[in-house]
Image: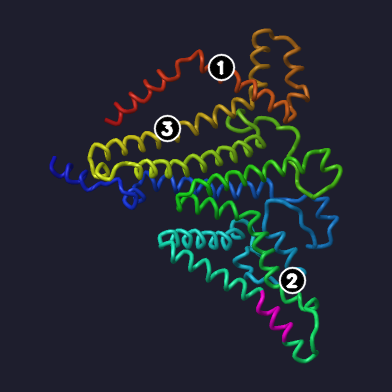
Amino acid sequence: MDIVEKHKSNETLHIPALRKKWQILTFQIISTFSLLVIMFRMNEIYGSCTDEFILAAEGSQYWCPAYEHTRGLIWLSNSNNLLIPNFLLGIGQTGISSFSGPLILCILATFGRSYLLLKSDKIQNDIKKITLIILATWILLPFLFSWFYSMAFNGIELPFKHYDSLLAPLSFMFELIFLGIVFAPVMAGMMGIWGLSRKLITWAMGYFLLVIGVHALLTFEDISGAFDLGLQSLPSQIGESTMLGGLISPLAYDLLEISILLLIFLESGLAAITHLEYAMSLPEGSKNDIEYIKQFNNVINSHLIHFFVIVFLVAFTTALALEFDDLLVSFVGFMQGTQWSGQVKESLELQMTYGKVISASLFMLVIAGMRYVVPWQRIIGIIESNLNNLRS
């Protein structure tokens, strides 16, 4: 008993100790893993150009605003030599290997920012000033040297013909922009997760949603018919349900996977920050109190269990919502057994994507209405009490 009490007394609610707790690390690792999987899956779904657009281009001289970084960098390298090495850009590599170099840069940037945040404000400002001075020197010094050197031999002249000295820094900026199309949210998300920044996590989440929304807008039939940017549009029909025992179609599964991954990334990343902020707000004297430590452990353990349960229920409920039209028509056909139900089930309107959205919205309304009928609080309380009994 004394050993147990001694072990508990060694625990503390100070931030350096809490950042090493396995529960906090679990939230952060889950959030980081889901962030990387989001990047891979969005690259597969939103990262290709149409075959017609590729055939219309000459060789590799093409680029479309897809969620893919190497295509733009290859297009840029055809006119200028790239300053960043190809192995760090992923050029000439396929599959996951093309992401390894940029991910290394993101990880180094995350560690650099986390290390910088541990320093004093004076050191941070000094590092920022030195970085700006180096950048300004790199941009202006070659330009000024070329201009003054030419005037030394040719006399006074305007600097217009020496602007090509500014192209190297400008090319470097374009390389970072093409990398940032894919890896800006990844770097921001990593910095938010491990640097404990809500703003960066929500920014990365918003960026992913913006990419999905812009892709849907630019591939809309009326807009793509007016001007073709070469983006690969998703099928207008959701497809047959052939996965998970006929519960969901492959296209709906891909979209559901991205939405659930976004939910996991946001919730797990913010969960770690929320618990650390709670511990930080406690009075200094209570951070070594055994009762406060026990309460904190109970809260974070319950949050971890709720997290997995809620994510599973959201995924399952959304899959049911996407199949609500089939379930409803099948139910009507079972009750009446008429030919009408089969004709309705085979109608094009129900098979189109907007038909699925309408039926899913109806299902969500039904589920939301059950909140006022089913005593969910009592049911959840019974489940939690049984889980606590099992753990004890």
Task: Count how many numbered circles sit on residues in the image.
Answer: 3
Mark on residue 306?
3
Q: Amino acid at mark 1?
A: Gly
Q: Residue at x 78, y 39 (%)?
A: 220
Q: Residue at x 51, y 53 (%)?
A: 190
Residue 153: x and y in percent read 77, 92
Mark on residue 369?
1
The residues tagged by marks 1 and 2 sit, at their Cα atoms, a distance apart of 60 Å
Q: Name the residue furthest top.
A: 336
The residues tagged by marks 2 and 3 sit, at their Cα atoms, a distance apart of 52 Å
The residues tagged by marks 3 and 1 sit, at their Cα atoms, a distance apart of 22 Å
Mark on residue 80?
2
Q: Give the camera-side residue of 120 and 210.
A: 120
Magenta-tinted stretch: 140-148
Q: Residue at x 62, y 45 (%)?
A: 208
Q: Residue at x 66, y 44 (%)?
A: 210
Q: Considering the numbered disc 2 on the image, is that residue within a helix, a strand or a loop?
A: loop
330 left or right of 201? right
Q: Give the camera-side residue of 113 and 233.
A: 113
